Image (cartoon, coloured by chain):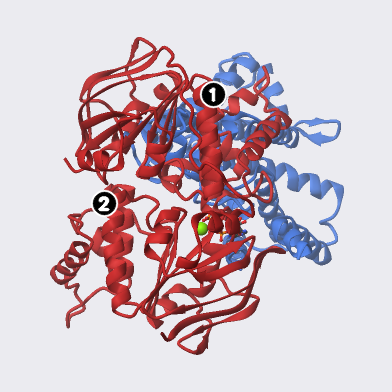
Chain colours: A red, B blue
Amino acid sequence: MSELLRLEAVSKSFSGNRVLDEVSFSLFRGSVLALAGENGAGKSTLMKVITGLYTCEAGQVLYRGDIVSFDNPRHAMDAGIAIIHQELNLLPNLSVTENIFLGRELRNGFGLLRSAEMIAATETLLAKLKQTIDPKALVGSLSLAQQQMVEIAKALSFEAEVIIMDEPTDALSDVETRVLFEVVANLKLQGKGLIFISHRLEEIFELCDQVAILRDGKMVHVGPTREINEQELIRHMVGRELSDRYPYAAVPKGDLRLQAEGLCAPGISDISFDAHAGEVIGFSGLIGAGRTELAHALYGVAELFAGRIMVEGAERRLTSPQDGVAAGIAYVSEDRKGEGLIQIHSLKSNMTLGTVRKFCSALGLLDLAKESRAVEQFVDAFAIKASGHDMPVQQMSGGNQQKVSLAKSLMAEPRILILDEPTRGVDVGAKREIYAQIQSLKEKGLCILLMSSDLPEVLGISDRVLVLSRGRLTASFTREEASQEKIMQAAIA
Amino acid sequence: MSFKKVLIDNKSLIALLLLMGAVSLYSPNFLTVDNLLNVLRQTSINAIIALGITYVILTAGIDLSVGSVLALSGAVCASLLAADTPLIVAFMATLFVGGMLGAANGVVISFFGVQPFIATLVGMTMLRGATLVFTDGRPISTGDFEVAEAFYQLGGGYVAGIPVPILLAAAVFGVGWLVLNRTAFGRYVYAIGGNEQVTLIAGINVRRVKIVVYMLSGAMAALAGMILTARLESAQPTAGLGYELDAIAAVVLGGTSLMGGRGTLIGTLIGALIIGVLNNALNLMDVSSYYQQIAKGGVILLAVVVDSRVKSR
Ligand SMILES: Nc1ncnc2c1ncn2[C@@H]1O[C@H](COP(=O)(O)OP(=O)(O)OP(=O)(O)O)[C@@H](O)[C@H]1O
Ligand SMILES: [Mg+2]
């Protein structure tokens, strides 16, 4: 096995704060290296150092034996290092093809674009990933998971030697993940080196040959995956044992909270179900099955063509998120960047965006101390890692952003909580905290709808599982009945 | 490290102080109380307009119509006074007119989805036309009633030795700062500019906030229009021509991002002062008004270029 990439004692700080501390590891041809670690451990930062988005203050990066220091990701790409960033980097108002060929468009002798050729190439790329996305569709019109697949296709199109995937599966369901894994296996055979970051531990054990674990910016373990088990991996990551990954206890079902009757809206048709207080209903399904669309309809983002929504026995016409909020519904979007958080604003103003009025006096003046206390509570409860309440969200690690997003919706003390991929990009320890939160909210009588592509999660914490396929409800299981196989079967129905 | 950050965070203020230092070296008359009060008085009109525009730009919008709103509301005010309307009524009615004209912009933008640039450009043209129609192209005198005398104080009066326009601007900035930094509405203004979709999903009435913001901008233009009218004791049909550019320049010099979501009112105040000092300096140096425009444009360009250099580090 020959070495493709080697890092030697790489260090990096942000305004005096050491994020990477003498990190070293090697990546070999024909192998997949897992990079594991808690939220904020420095995984994404390390990858950005490799691809030249950040420069390291100490240490060096060797690529095929030579010391390299790329000025920007473009140069890294030209040298053969491609990266799929954790936060998607596609331009929503360009088509899939335009995004994939951005900056390296094919042109004919007159300088005109060879569109047909590029579209055909895009189709081929997408076909490799078993996707039937229209190459001419605007990226903004695609679901998050589809966008992720486009991002993957784009990275593959460079035919790079080293491919870095920063949480590529966090928005994907099992079927798409399977496809990605096949592609990765193929790349391995071709002798490429891959770095794979994921908070889904099962995936690390299934896909990766080596595992490297970062904790607080230090490399605490590097070794073959087969020599380590899940418990040990978690211990290295979080520095302690973690029992019982999915805390769950049934609570007596309360009153009928939500009734959906024959809901038809963009992307969903004829969906009916009931949800009670003190209940977690998991919604499972593939990419494009209509989970997010259902969430949008229930929250008032998308208007119904037909059907009705009853909240606590009274019919509600939800025509905007304001109506959703007024009906006691809160929604955590799967799309942090587009719908969840204002990237340039602080943790604090994001967390209280929908609820600032609560912190205003009778005169309408904000009580900053009161707001600060409420924010502090959530920062503590979710162990959010940030330099302070004024830290811009865009400087926080992905998982910590997700926690802010969740806290923001809980600030409103909703009666019905819709969670769309609530643990996207969240580390094992924090996931467990979120599940524990969900459990305690359930005990407090909240009605929780959990849209998730993480099957173990759906099975782990739901009281009931509903399966969607192509916009329709295809199955409903109680907790006891539900199993991975049954859900998958209903999902591809 | 942190010293550098302090420098960068206060670069508008530093620029203002450097400019004042340079001017005072050149012209000993600059740093006299009289001249400084004069600068402040001349700056207050632009500062008041710029306050409204700061709100608009924070929502990632723009308002080009303020100059025309200023002219039309000034004319309305003058004709009300000429008809011996009680001062407070004329004052409130004029603010109301300005606010409604601004709100109309807001409605066009948030309900018909017209780009703010286009909507307010159209507003600027139409309202200038409306002013010319209303005034018949001639100045309107505030008249000879006692009320006109009282009204004059708004632009030309003094309280405790300080010109009234300065006091008005100070009051408006005080309240404006409070609203922007200490109310839910202020948070929404920033949020809309930061990411409109996120704000909408959070259940906030984005349309209403936007309409109020443009309404505020219109009302500020009307206030500025009254100060100008009071001082001249008449409303000019061509009043306020090009004022939108000075106001936008003040906002940008003050470090507010044209992309929205980032900026401060203090910055805008400093930006307006930079422009005020510059105008004053060019006058003290006897630069002809033709060259003044070129010089002013050059300085603004320089400031913005330096600013983007510092930021991209
Ligand atoms: N541009 C930045 N400015 C300041 N701090 C930053 C910046 N980027 C990252 N950080 C900080 O560096 C630390 C590491 O962040 P990084 O994104 O690498 O974490 P991560 O391991 O990828 O976490 P996650 O699993 O949540 O994605 C975090 O504490 C984060 O707040
Ligand atoms: Mg990361």
Q: Is mark 1 within 8 Å of ligand 1?
A: no
On what subunit does the disc labeled 2 rest? A
In this picture, residue B180 sits left or right of residue B72 = right
Q: Which residue is at the front of the view, A194 or A294?
A: A194
Q: Which residue is at the front of the view, A103 or B225?
A: A103
User: Mark 1 or mark 2, which is nearer to you?
Assistant: 2
Q: Which residue is at the front of the view, A118 or A291?
A: A291
- Residue furthest to the bottom in view is A66
Indicate the quadrant containing the N terminus of chain B: top left, top right, bottom left or bottom right.
bottom right
Q: Looking at the picture, does residue A74 appear above or below residue B293? A: below
On what subunit does the disc labeled 1 rest? A
Quadrant assignment, res B86:
top right
Q: Which mark is residue A319?
A: none
Q: Position of residue A328 (x, y in %)?
A: 46, 20
Quadrant assignment, res A128:
bottom left
The residue under label 2 is: A175
Question: Crowdedness of circle 2 by 10 Å Cα count: few (<14), some, many (20+)?
Answer: some
Spatial distance from mark 1 to mark 2, Cα to Cα? Answer: 35 Å
Q: Looking at the picture, does residue B256 appear above or below residue A445? A: below
Find numbered disc 2 in the image and state the secondary structure of the residue it sits on: helix
The residue under label 1 is: A413
Q: Which amino acid does the dot numbered 1 rest on?
A: Glu
Find numbered disc 1 in the image and state the secondary structure of the residue it sits on: loop
> Do marks 1 and 2 both belong to one polypeptide chain?
yes
Q: Which amino acid does the dot numbered 2 rest on?
A: Val
Q: Position of residue B122 (x, y in %)?
A: 37, 40
Q: Earlier in the sequence, mark 1 or mark 2?
A: 2
Q: Position of residue B79 (x, y in %)?
A: 53, 22
Q: Are marks 1 and 2 in contact (CB under 8 Å)?
A: no
The answer, for residue B283, to whether it is visible in the render is: no
> Which residue does the image show at 45% across and 16% down from the upper left?
A252
> Which residue does the image show at 44% across and 78% down from the upper left?
A76
